[in-house]
Amino acid sequence: GLLYDTTVCIGCKACVAACTAANGLEPDTEMSGGIWQMPVDLNPQTKNIIQLYRSPDGAESSFMKRQCMQCVDPACASACPFSALSKGKFGIVEWEPSRCIGCRFCEISCPFDVPRFEWAKFNPKIVKCELCRHRLPEGLQPACTEVCPVGAVIFGTRDQLLREAHRRIAANPGKY
């Protein structure tokens, strides 16, 4: 899984660009007139995004990383009538294109609004973070964790991530 620490994230969006490159996606440059990659939200070209959250009174702000939560019991997989989405190796919610009929039940059922359907493509697919599962057998970690310059997002087993979270909290309890 991933551990994302909002108190460390600087909003550089290196993770967004690395994800796009590692997964062979076209950068979403619509908002910049074709110049910069600057997606507004998850979409068929963007599997993860850093968004700025501001409190309603504007007194506080924080960067938030949005992507598939790799749920323990994923609603998207439960809703899929042909098991195109399933919990796979390493606990990753994986999409199998040969089983997908394009019903988009996964989009409707996800409480986090993550899976996105490629409406503009002739042969569309569902786009969502799969923790760079194509990189893991090569001993590589997900691209987003590999490029984070401040360690705001790290990859590991659940036990490793919990130990690191507890270490960070103990080292600076007033921060969390």
Image (cartoon, rainbow, N blue to C red):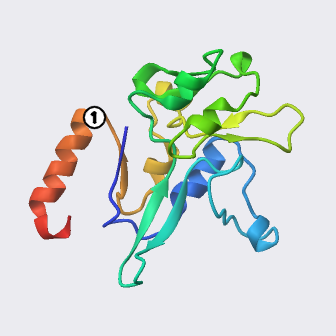
> Which residue is rendered at x = 64% and y = 64% of the image?
40
Vertical side of 18 occupied by 61: above or below: below
Which image quarter holds the N terminus? top left
Q: Is residue 121 left or right of residue 11?
A: right
**How would you rate the neighbour count of disc 1 (Cα within 10 Å): few for under 14, some for 14-19, many for 20 or more?**
few
> Which residue is rendered at x = 15% and y = 58% of the image?
169
**Percent of width and height locating residue 145:** 43, 49
Vertical side of 23 occupied by 11: above or below: below
Q: Is residue 9 visible?
A: yes
Q: Is residue 172 visible?
A: no
Q: Is residue 52 left or right of residue 42?
A: left
Vertical side of 4 occupied by 81: above or below: above
Which image quarter holds the C terminus? bottom left
In the image, 149 versus 52, the foreground residue is: 52
**Percent of width and height locating residue 63:** 43, 67
Q: Residue furthest right?
A: 122
Residue at the spot of label 1: 158
Q: Secondary structure at mark 1?
A: helix
The disc labelled 1 sits on which kind of residue?
Arg
